Amino acid sequence: MKARIFGACVALTILVSLINRRSPEPETKDGAPQNEANLVFSKEPPDPVLSDTMLAGYAGKDTSAAEDLEMMARFIDSVFLLVKKRDTADYSTNEDLVLFLHGSNSHRRPFLAQDGPALNSKGQLVDRWNSPLILHPVSQKLLELRSAGGDKIPYTKDDLLWPDQS
């Protein structure tokens, strides 16, 4: 009986020592132990959101204003495909749409990054001239987008409209 208890104690001690044994510290490419000073990120990078990929290049030098508006429309359409439970009140104004895209939706998930070329300092979706986009919910499935164009005055002949009605 004493031998069994002694054997069980030895086995338990070995098991505990294996569990508590620290794994070796990860090493960097040069063989030095990894520490806070040589980490790539100072803090954990944020979770990517849909806008990180779908709006890459928005208002950039390689895209036109019309392409920017189409890029924004396709991004919003993609979010609407993902979030089926919504109301036109969720996106009746620019600010409402931004709240919806930032996570005030039935999924409670953000689809739009907190910063980037698509937002101005007031948190509005903007065109390449930093003018707020004008939204017109035509129906549950169609949202009309308008850019004020280069003159920054809405409803003039240089405005861009999506979907294009010409």
Image (cartoon, rainbow, N blue to C red):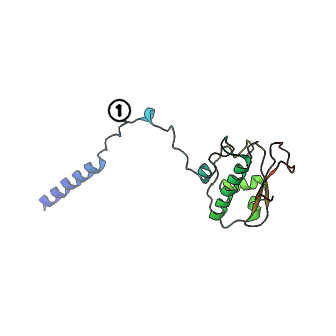
**Residue 128 or 125: which is nearer the viewer?**
128
Residue 91 lies left or right of residue 116; in this view the side is: right
- In the image, residue 62 sits, relative to residue 4, either above or below, namely above
- The percent position of residue 92, horizontal first and vertical second, equals 78, 59
In the image, what residue occupies the spot 66% across and 53% down?
102
Residue furthest to the front:
166
In the image, what residue occupies the spot 64% across and 49% down?
55
Q: How many marks?
A: 1
- The percent position of residue 132, horizontal first and vertical second, equals 78, 47
Specify the amino acid type for callout 1.
Asp
In the image, what residue occupies the spot 67% across and 42% down?
60
Residue 25 lies left or right of residue 113; in this view the side is: left
Q: Which residue is mark 1?
A: 30
Q: Quadrant of the N terminus?
A: bottom left
Residue furthest to the right:
156
The image quarter in which residue 136 lies: bottom right
